[in-house]
Image (cartoon, rainbow, N blue to C red):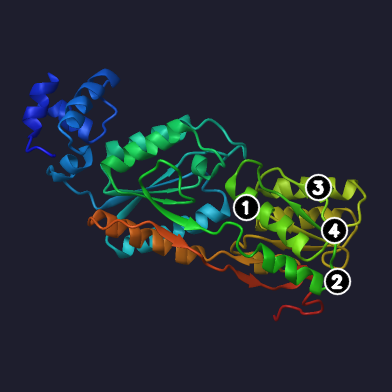
């Protein structure tokens, strides 16, 4: 049974000041672990939720939100951030961007320490809410420290995470079907005469790669198409990875009719490697993408790919966050069907030329 206890009584029983209790309730990093534990013992003994007390306290709003993402140079994250910013401004809020470089500038996954620091920065800036995209959240197995840090942030401010639900994490999630649409690509390619189909790009241990690769293998089996691990090469999500992966696949001298790239950047790098090998796309090898980025229609040849509807997801994230800031919280699952955009790189529109 909950008791009527004030912040002053919590301070007295904990042997600390009222301001210290306030910092604990707001999850300020300027409190030692020992002091935090002492205050939390009193709160738990009295069966009180720190969230309930913190939200009952007077708190000034800044009409700003924070967005934490791993690499703004990645077209997926930059396009998504643009949509988030657009809808945030429409609600009269400003946006603080925190680019953690988790897998960013060097295109290699680094230490999660930087991400946790950015969570603390958000609390120090006293933003009204936060959207977290990618980073360690997208790993198959995020660290326990990361989940705890995300929970602490969510105890201070409403947090919407664009990603798959993390076990033990209480923030709002916008769950996506990461493998959605891969079957559509694979059903389309054999209709054009392609049977030996490879898969390139994406990092092992990242959910997006894991789910898309799982869908790729399952669909090949369902269609009774040749499946070989030699036709799968994983690395990362950038232009140079597509070029390197495609060159490696060609060097194996295996018969391959088409490749599915993890995204448009990898697909663009792959097409360059095909041309450097004195082959043509799509006449010799068709190239398609799991994640269409802005500009794919201006590649040569124009890229076939899946439109993952980032505009819709960005808008949904802001609507969920605005509701959470007003006290209405509900995790959203999106069973969306990405749109297959058919262009020249798959071979379906050979001979079609752009109008001047």
| Circle 2 or circle 4, nearest the eye | 4
Specify the label residue 229 is tagged with: 3
Task: Compare marks 4 and 1 and give the one earlier in the sequence.
Answer: 1
| Circle 2 or circle 1, nearest the eye | 1
- Position of the N terminus, as image quadrant, is top left
Residue pushed farthest front?
Answer: 1
Left or right, residue 18 beside residue 66: left
Question: Is disc 4 in contact with disc 1, using a CB cutoff of under 8 Å?
Answer: no
Left or right, residue 219 beside residue 319: right
Left or right, residue 39 beside residue 130: left
Vertical order, 49 against 310 (above or below): above
Specify the label residue 211 is tagged with: 1
Q: Residues within 10 Å of mark 4 (few under 14, many from 20)?
A: few
Q: CA distance from mark 3 to mark 1?
A: 16 Å
Q: Residues within 10 Å of mark 2 (few under 14, many from 20)?
A: few
Q: CA distance from mark 4 to mark 3?
A: 10 Å
Counting every numbered tag in the picture gives: 4
Task: Compare marks 3 and 1 and give the one earlier in the sequence.
Answer: 1
Q: Nearer the viewer, residue 177 or 356?
A: 177
Q: CA distance from mark 2 to mark 3?
A: 21 Å
Q: What kind of element bears circle 1?
A: helix
Q: Which residue is mark 4?
A: 226
- Residue at x 81% of width, y 52% of height: 273
Question: What is the x, y in percent for residue 241?
Answer: 72, 46
Q: CA distance from mark 2 to mark 1?
A: 26 Å
Question: Is disc 2 in contact with disc 1, using a CB cutoff of under 8 Å?
Answer: no
Task: Compare marks 2 and 1 and give the one earlier in the sequence.
Answer: 2
Q: Which residue is mark 2?
A: 193
Question: Is disc 3 in contact with disc 1, using a CB cutoff of under 8 Å?
Answer: no
């Amino acid at each position: 049974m909950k008791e009527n206890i004030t912040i002053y009584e919590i301070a007295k029983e904990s042997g600390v000041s009222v301001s210290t209790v306030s910092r604990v309730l707001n999850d300020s990093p300027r409190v030692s672990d020992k002091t935090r534990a002492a205050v939390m013992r009193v709160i738990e003994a009295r069966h009180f939720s720190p969230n309930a007390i913190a939200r009952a306290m007077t708190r000034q709003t800044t009409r700003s939100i924070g967005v934490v993402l791993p690499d703004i140079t990645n077209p997926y994250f930059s396009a998504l951030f643009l949509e988030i910013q657009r809808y945030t401004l429409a609600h009269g809020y400003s946006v603080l961007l925190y680019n953690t470089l988790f897998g960013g500038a060097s295109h290699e996954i680094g230490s999660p320490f930087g991400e946790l620091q950015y969570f603390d920065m958000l609390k120090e800036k006293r933003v009204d809410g936060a959207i977290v995209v990618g980073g360690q959240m997208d790993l198959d197995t995020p660290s326990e420290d990361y989940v705890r840090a995300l929970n602490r942030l969510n105890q201070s401010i409403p947090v919407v995470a664009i990603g798959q639900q993390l076990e033990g994490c209480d923030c709002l999630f916008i769950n996506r079907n990461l493998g959605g649409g891969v079957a559509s690509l694979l059903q389309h390619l054999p209709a054009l005469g392609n049977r030996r189909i490879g898969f390139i790009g994406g990092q092992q241990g990242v959910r997006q790669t894991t789910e898309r690769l799982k869908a790729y293998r399952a669909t090949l089996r369902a269609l009774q198409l040749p499946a070989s691990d030699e036709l799968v090469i994983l690395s990362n999500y950038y232009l140079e990875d597509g070029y390197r992966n495609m060159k490696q696949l060609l060097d194996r001298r295996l018969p391959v009719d088409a490749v599915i790239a993890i995204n448009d950047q990898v697909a663009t790098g792959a097409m360059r490697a095909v041309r450097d090998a004195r082959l043509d796309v799509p006449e010799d090898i068709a190239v398609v993408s799991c994640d269409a980025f802005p500009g794919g229609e201006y590649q040569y040849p124009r890229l076939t790919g899946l439109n993952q509807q980032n505009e819709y997801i960005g808008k949904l994230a802001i609507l969920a966050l605005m509701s959470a800031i007003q006290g209405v919280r509900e995790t959203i699952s999106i069973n969306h069907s990405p749109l297959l955009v058919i262009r020249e790189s798959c071979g379906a529109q050979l001979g079609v030329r752009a109008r001047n």
